[in-house]
Image: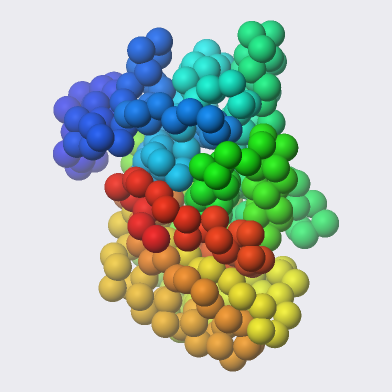
Amino acid sequence: MKKIINKPIDFVDETIDGLIKSHPDIYSLASDNSRVIKRASKAFNKVGLVTGGGSGHLPVFTGYVGKGLLDSCAIGSVFASPSVDQIASAIRNADNGNGVLCILGNYGGDVMNFEMACEIVKEEGINTKTVIVADDIASAKPEEKEKRRGIAGMIFVFKVAGGFAETGASLDDVFKLATITNENIRTLGVALSPCILPEAGKPTFEISDDEIEIGMGIHGEPGISREKMKSANDLTDDICKRILDDFNLNKNEEISLMINSLGATPLEELYIISRRVIENLNKNEIKIFKNYVGRYATSMEMAGMSVTLLKLNKEIKDNLIAPSNCPFWTN
């Protein structure tokens, strides 16, 4: 294992410390929990937005705390759910009397711990609602969409809900728009190589140098097919076909696009993929409103990428491009 770290056991806490020290105008540490990051300046007169999940995915989850995005985040150990106490702290730190919307990926430990934390804060008078993001088309069939994992598409939900919350919209209305956004996202990724967890010191899975895995999860969960390496065009065509077959998109509908690196895949390769995705969408007469290319949801140093499509309506579109302040997102 080669990593630029100190002690593996300190990896998460030193990451959090570095994030806060590097961006003190954006992030601060909650006074009641060392694994909760909140906005440097607390927002008022709005619905609070909270997320949480394991470390190892920056900018997800912690990086998207900021104006026009999230109010706080509970962060677990690498690839591990945050605790119930950490999540309850994040909810308390986000609340300003208008209720709190929790947005999380569809992972068993996260879902269970958020449910218990919401019950705890309910007894304290904090009203919550939850949106469980499920955009990974590789993890379940369309008729079982509620079983799908949440991956890069959750960032679109953070942004749309965050923009709407800043307008003073009610908890019910922010929840409704976040739910509609979640229902209109599809993502599919491919892994080329594994990552190494600092405390484990060994790869999360094994794959041959000439192989790729379509649909592998961000924690190394099995995908839908392991294949021989292919050209960027052929791989991208395959991913686009799978997404479009799953998605009910009509001609002249408008989408936003995200081409995301899982960690090690460089921007040059992402733009080679992006050009081909755009060609596929143009061929299908689907309009692209905005394209995001970069590292948005990673898996340590895993090589690979994901493609996400968000179908737009006016309300989603307006809040997607609403002002925000975060080191990892620009409009």
Where, quadrant-wise, is the C terminus in this rendering?
bottom left
243 vs 12, left or right, is right
Horizontal and vertical percent position of residue 89: 49, 16
- Residue 294 to residue 26: above or below: below
- Residue 19 to residue 9: above or below: below
Residue closer to the observer: 263 or 182: 182
Tell which residue pokes out farthest to the right in this image. 143
Q: Residue at x 42, y 76 (%)?
A: 273
Q: Quadrant of residue 57?
A: top left
Q: Residue at x 52, y 58 (%)?
A: 320
Horizontal and vertical percent position of residue 124: 64, 8
Residue closer to the observer: 135 or 313: 313
- Residue 316 to residue 99: above or below: below
The reply to whether residue 195 is visible in this rendering is: no
Residue closer to the observer: 120 or 69: 69
Horizontal and vertical percent position of residue 214: 55, 64
267 vs 101, left or right, is left
